[in-house]
Image (cartoon, rainbow, N blue to C red):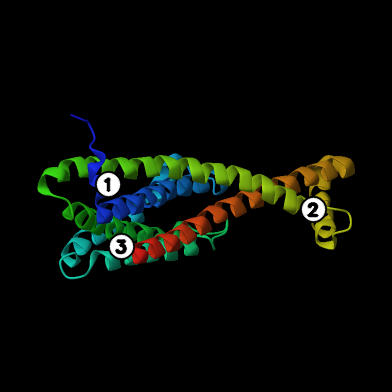
Amino acid sequence: KPFINFHVLKNYNFTMGMVLMFFTGITLYGMTAIVPLFLQALMGYTALQSGLAMVPRGFGALVAMPLAGRLTNKVQGRYLVAFGFLVFAISSFAMSRITTDISPSILFWPLFLSGFSVGFMIVPLNTQSLGSLKPEEIGNGSGIFNLMRNVGGSVGISLVTTIAQRAAQRHQVFLAGHMTPYDPAYLSQLHATSSAYAMDSGVYGGHQQALGALYNTLLSQASLLAYLDDFILFALGCIACIEIGRAS
């Protein structure tokens, strides 16, 4: 007797629900991983502060779970799932507009909406997909369903961290192209920074410190753009999941 019986994959509704649950795992765990990294690496948050900043996401899920459960019997599951992915896409687009000058209050609603959307993705997907199986297949199907969510989470965490690292390198190369003696904005900033450092370190030392400060700024901006790329990819992935759900 097999530990996992893949016979349940012949059920079309279950298979499509499993695919969407895989992408739900990518968005759910990927966002959970990337936001604290952003807050700690670029905003200077401690691990505790970044964890507290994620609290609105939990509140959103707390509100959405019972609401989605009540609506499951009144609205078709595919519409609820599409709504969940749409809300997550909106929150991801909002996150892609942030800068390093933000405060925790600005993050409240995007994080709340991302948590709120999860309730409308998980609850209807479970109900609609497992509800299409025979009673004796539900246990086996539930195991596969949860497995796909966890596998999606592993893929999501690996994906967002890899993209953040490689995109930061790409943006660094692009931004460095503007740090030349022929760029008026760069020369103006270099002169102002060198003058500020020269009062304590002398002309040569101030110039070297200014170059280091501007390079650190370049690295920070390249990393910021890389994280914003991740948020945009989350949004585009959710829109693609809406199309998959509509086609099914």
State which mark lies toward you, 1 or 3. 1
Residue 242 vertical placement versus 28 (above, below):
below
Residue type at tag 3: Val
Residue at the spot 50% in from the left edge and 46% down from the top edge? 160
Residue 218's tag is none
Which image quarter: residue 136?
top left
Which image quarter: residue 157?
top left
Where does the image place residue 15, in percent across and percent down from the top left?
Answer: 30, 51
Mark 2 or mark 3: which comes first in sequence? Answer: 3
Q: CA distance from mark 2 to mark 3?
A: 44 Å
Q: Which residue is mark 1?
A: 9
Q: CA distance from mark 1 to mark 3?
A: 20 Å
Viewer can see residue 109: no
Q: Which residue is mark 3?
A: 81
State which mark lies toward you, 2 or 1. 1
State which mark lies toward you, 2 or 3. 3
| Few, some or many residues within 10 Å of mark 3 (<14, 14–19, 20+) | many
Q: Which residue is mark 2?
A: 177
Residue type at tag 1: Leu
Where does the image place residue 38, in percent across and percent down from the top left?
Answer: 52, 48
Residue 116 vertical placement versus 219 (above, below):
below
Q: Is residue 239 left or right of residue 65?
A: right
SS at badge 1: helix
